[in-house]
Image (spheres, coloured by chain):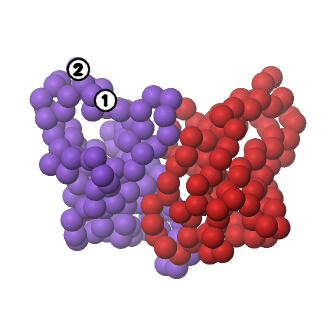
Chain colours: A red, B purple
């Protein structure tokens, strides 16, 4: 699976959009981009995933660049409960292989 | 849907004893489950892959005789930490794969193990 690079930490003001970047320059054509988050002392929670088109669900939006070498997770209106470590993972969809977690980004939403 | 229940949430045990952690898929059948370990301020590290009805596949450096994994049914996988030592204290998390073709991954809530 391709390796990902994320900033170690980010702050965001409550109510503002949180934009979390991820670089995956070695991504293969059949690898999807997954985003999970982990609130302290809990299991990871699925947020969103995509292949090459932008995706949106009730939690977030995923913007993938045209060359697919990077992506951005957008939380449109961050709340204090969004404070967590956010993991960007690339993996082959349909493979049922394990997800490999990098170091992630610690997002802190400030009041 | 696709809910995974992990128990216990936390456990304290004495050195030398064994601890069993359960991971159950509540509303789907999980052919494959994964066990991760997470030390403080670190990311999740895969320990092993558990396949129903067959032996688990362990990652390099993980002692299979110490971390016993049993996946005897499509809804239950267990991790037993045998002869636990303080260095085994960690956060253990299971994950289950669901779906056919378009797979999804659901994680348990984790188990905080403290060995004293």
User: Above or below — where is B72 with respect to B109?
Assistant: below
Contact between labelled residues 1 and 2, with CB atoms less than 8 Å apart = no
Q: Is disc 1 surrounded by few (<14), some (14 to 19) or many (20+) residues within 10 Å?
A: many
Q: Residue furthest right?
A: A16
Q: Residue furthest bottom?
A: B101
Q: Is disc 2 surrounded by few (<14), some (14 to 19) or many (20+) residues within 10 Å?
A: few
Q: Residue at 79%, 67% (x, y): give it.
A: A67
CA–CA distance between discs 2 and 1?
A: 9 Å
- Subunit of label 2: B
**Which quadrant of the rendered structure holds the C terminus of chain A?**
top right
**Residue A81 visible in the snapshot:** no
Q: Residue at 34%, 50% (x, y): give it.
A: B47
Q: Say which residue label 1 marks.
A: B89
Q: Residue at 27%, 47% (x, y): give it.
A: B62
Q: How many marks?
A: 2
User: Above or below — where is B112 with respect to B93?
Assistant: above
SS under mark 1: loop
**Residue B91 visible in the snapshot:** yes
Residue A74 at x, y = what percent? 80, 49
SS under mark 2: loop
Q: Is residue B37 left or right of residue B101?
A: left
Residue B42 at x, y = what percent? 49, 34
Q: Is residue B43 left or right of residue B69?
A: right
Q: Name the one closer to the observer, B12 or B5.
A: B12
Q: Say which residue label 2 marks.
A: B116
Residue A63 at x, y = what percent? 80, 59
Residue B67 at x, y = what percent? 22, 46
Q: Which circle's residue, 2 or 1, is located before the other in the chain? A: 1
Q: Name the one closer to the observer, B64 or B11.
A: B64
Dividing the picture into quadrants, the one containing residue B29 is bottom left
């Amino acid at each position: 699976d391709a390796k990902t690079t994320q900033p170690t930490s980010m702050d965001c003001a409550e109510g503002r959009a949180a934009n979390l970047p991820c670089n995956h320059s070695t991504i293969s054509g059949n690898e999807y981009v997954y985003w999970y988050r982990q609130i302290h002392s809990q299991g990871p929670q699925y947020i969103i995933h995509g292949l090459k088109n932008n995706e949106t669900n009730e939690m977030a939006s995923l913007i993938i660049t045209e060359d697919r070498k990077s992506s951005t997770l957008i939380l449109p209106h961050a709340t204090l409960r969004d404070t967590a470590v956010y993991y960007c993972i690339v993996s082959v969809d349909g493979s049922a292989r394990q997800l490999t977690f990098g170091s992630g980004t610690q997002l802190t939403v400030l009041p | 849907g696709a809910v995974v229940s992990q128990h216990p949430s936390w456990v304290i045990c004495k050195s030398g004893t064994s601890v069993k952690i359960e991971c159950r898929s509540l509303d789907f059948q999980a052919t494959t489950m994964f066990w991760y370990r997470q030390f403080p301020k670190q990311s999740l590290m895969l320990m092993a892959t558990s396949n129903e009805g067959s032996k688990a596949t362990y990652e390099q450096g993980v002692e299979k005789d110490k971390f016993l994994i049993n996946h005897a049914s499509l809804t239950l996988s267990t991790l037993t930490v045998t002869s636990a030592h303080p260095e085994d204290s960690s956060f253990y998390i299971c994950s289950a794969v669901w779906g056919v073709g378009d797979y999804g991954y659901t994680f348990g809530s984790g188990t905080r193990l403290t060995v004293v």
